[in-house]
Amino acid sequence: MTTPRTVVVTGTSSGIGLSTAVLAAKGGWQVVATLRDQARADALRERAANEGVTLDIRALDVTRTDDVDALIADVVETYGRLDAVVNNAGAGLVGTVETLTLDDFRRCMEVNFFAVVAVSRAALPHLRASKGRLVTVSSVGGIVGQPFNEAYCAAKFAVEGFLESLHPVAAAAGVDVVVVEPGAVATQFAGTAVGDRDALVADAGPYEDSLRAYLARTAGAFANAQEPDGVGAVILDALESPAPAFRVQTSPNASAFVGLKLADLDGSSVTTATRSWIDA
């Protein structure tokens, strides 16, 4: 019998990570599904049971480098190989530079950028051995800076720069690197990023009107958001495609939005578009 390929998926308690873990297991992968808090694994276990698949669910705080190293080492010891990683764990943060603290920025960078570096660094020796694949969930916010998302977009821009630089180096060693860029997705992510809306608005000071306009616009965008399984299907294709692209968007809307930036040499198209988001 052929040994199943093994993939580690981070951030699987809900949304994109949950869908990706289940869809990969249905596709024949041995899935190690990680999440920071095992108490939040019920939805993942229920979906796996309903789909008739088995997952290896493990606790992992991706901001703890020693834990990341230990988990990757244990996965390789348990299964004898590591064929792919999906860096999905992350957290949004809504606010602007005057209303956030430097510690807010640092925490956002830790979970969204440095954790990706840590997981990738731990996995790469094993991915080289298997000629495997490193897939990372970025965002359209990794290409287009968005109002009241300075910290989050900065972290995702860093992810894109890191992986775009790594891509040819890893390819020379036989490892494919793929960045997946969703737009609005129907998950808990946006609500978690905003937190207490009333408190956020109350603390906005001179930016209150702009923030209210932004929140109204964002609510409309997420009302028509892509379903997580749609994103998971794109990620599964990135895992299995014989010749994956480096950068993949998960919907036509995401492709159009990213294209706005990539064809915008002087930056005017992007800032004109995003300025309309905050006009009261």
Image (cartoon, grey):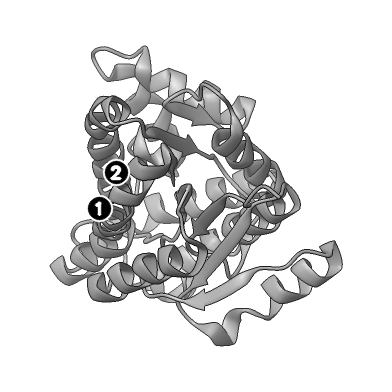
Numbered circle sitting on residue 121: 1
Identify the residue shown where x is 18% and y is 69%.
101
Q: Quadrant of the C terminus?
A: top left
Up-down relation of residue 251 to residue 15 (above or below): above
Identify the residue shown where x is 37% and y is 12%.
263
- Residue 211 at what x, y percent from top left? 40, 54
| Nearest to the observer: residue 219 or residue 154 | 154
- Residue 258 at what x, y percent from top left? 45, 25
Up-down relation of residue 238 to residue 258 (above or below): below
- Residue 43 at what x, y percent from top left? 70, 74
Residue indicated by mark 2: 159
Residue sitting at the far front = 1
Helix, strand or loop for disc 1: helix
Please, what is the three-letter code of the amino acid marked with disc 2? Val
Residue sitting at the far bottom = 39
- Residue 60 at what x, y percent from top left? 41, 75
Identify the residue shown where x is 50% and y is 64%.
11
Direction from residue 198 to residue 68 in the image, left or right: left
Q: Quadrant of residue 253?
A: top right
Q: Give the mark nearer the N terminus: 2 vs 1.
A: 1
In this orientation, does residue 279 appear? no
From mark 2 to mark 1, how far is it between C-alphas? 13 Å
Direction from residue 49 to residue 165 in the image, left or right: left
Q: Within 10 Å of the Cα at label 2, are there few (<14), some (14-19), or many (20+) other Cα atoms?
A: many
Identify the residue shown where x is 58% and y is 41%.
235
| Nearest to the observer: residue 127 or residue 187 | 127
Up-down relation of residue 30 to residue 128 (above or below): below
| Nearest to the observer: residue 78 or residue 8 | 78
Residue sitting at the far left = 102
